Image: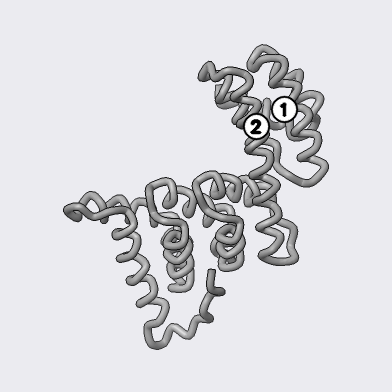
Amino acid sequence: MKTCCVALLLVIAGTPVGAQQGLAGRVPPEIATLVRQLATSAAARGIPVEPLIQKAIEGSAKGVPAERVATALRALAAQLDAAAAALQQAGPARPDTAAIAAGAFALNAGLSPRDVTALAQVSRPPYSTAVTLRVASTLAAMGVPAAQTVELVTQTIASGGPATDVLGLPAQVMVGVSHGRGVTPAQAAAGLTRAAAARANAPGQNRPKPPHP
C-alpha cells in the first residue's frame, strides 16, 4: 500500500492530468477533478501538491462526504499558499516544498503566518525549516500556546545544541506532563524554555541572539 501511494504521489507531482487518472477508483470523480484543478494551479506557483493528494485519499478512505472533502481540499490549498507567503517573508530564498507543506501543517495546528515566518528565520543549518515547523505544529497540537511554542523552539535553537534537541521537544513536554502532578503542556514547555534560555545565555556561549518572534 505504501509503495502504491508513493507511486501515485510521483505521478501527481509531475502531471496533474495524470493525477486525475491515478485517483480514479480511489476518490469520487468530482474530487479527482478538483484535485487536478488545484494541483495544476499549485504546481504553477511552486506549491507542493502531495498534501492535496493525501487529503483527498484520506477523506475518501474514511467515507467523508465528497462536499466535505472538497471544502477541506480548498482550505488546505489556501493554507499552502499562506505558508508559502509566510516563508517568503523570512528571506529571499525560495522556500522548498517540504517547508511549505510543514508551514501549512503549522497553520492548521493554530500557529499564525507571523509565527511561521519567525520560525523560518531562526531555522538555519543544522536546523531544518521543515523539521522546525513540524515540531512546532506538534507542540501546538499538544496544547502548548502558539507564542510559547515559538519561544520554546527559538530558545532551543539559540542554545546551540544538535538538531535532535529540537526534534525531542514534544517528547520532553510529554515527559514533563506525565511526571508532574497536574502539569499542563504549557507549564512543561515553560520549564523547557527557561532551561534552553539559560543554556543560550550561559557564559562563554557567545551565540548571536535569534530574531524575536
Write down the residue under mark 1. Answer: 35
Q: Tell me what residue is drawn at x 60 percent, y 46 percent.
A: 104
Q: Quadrant of the N terminus?
A: top right
Residue 202 x, y percent position in the rendering? 37, 83
- Residue 178 horizontal/vertical position (percent): 23, 49
Q: Is residue 130 left or right of residue 183?
A: right
In this orientation, which residue lies closer to the viewer: 118 or 26?
A: 118
The spot of residue 177 in percent (x, y) is: 26, 52
- Ranked by sequence position, the earlier of labels 1 and 2 is 1
Q: Residue at x 65, y 30 (%)?
A: 53
Along the line of sight, which residue is nearer the eye, 35 or 98? 35
Of residue 56 and residue 163, the one placed in the foreground of this image is 56
Number of marks in picture: 2
**Mark 2 = which residue?**
73
Residue at position x 75%, y 66% in the image: 92
Q: Residues within 10 Å of mark 2 (few under 14, many from 20)?
A: many
Q: Using residue 108 as the reference point, say whether residue 83 is left or right of it.
A: right
Relative to residue 205, is residue 19 depicted above or below?
Answer: above
Q: Secondary structure at mark 2?
A: helix
**Circles 1 and 2 in contact, beta carbons < 8 Å:** yes
In the displayed orientation, state which residue is furthest to the left. 181
- Crowding near pointer 1: few (<14 within 10 Å), some, many (20+)? many
Vertically, is 70 above or below 204? above
Give amino acid for label 1: Val
Discs 1/2, front:
2
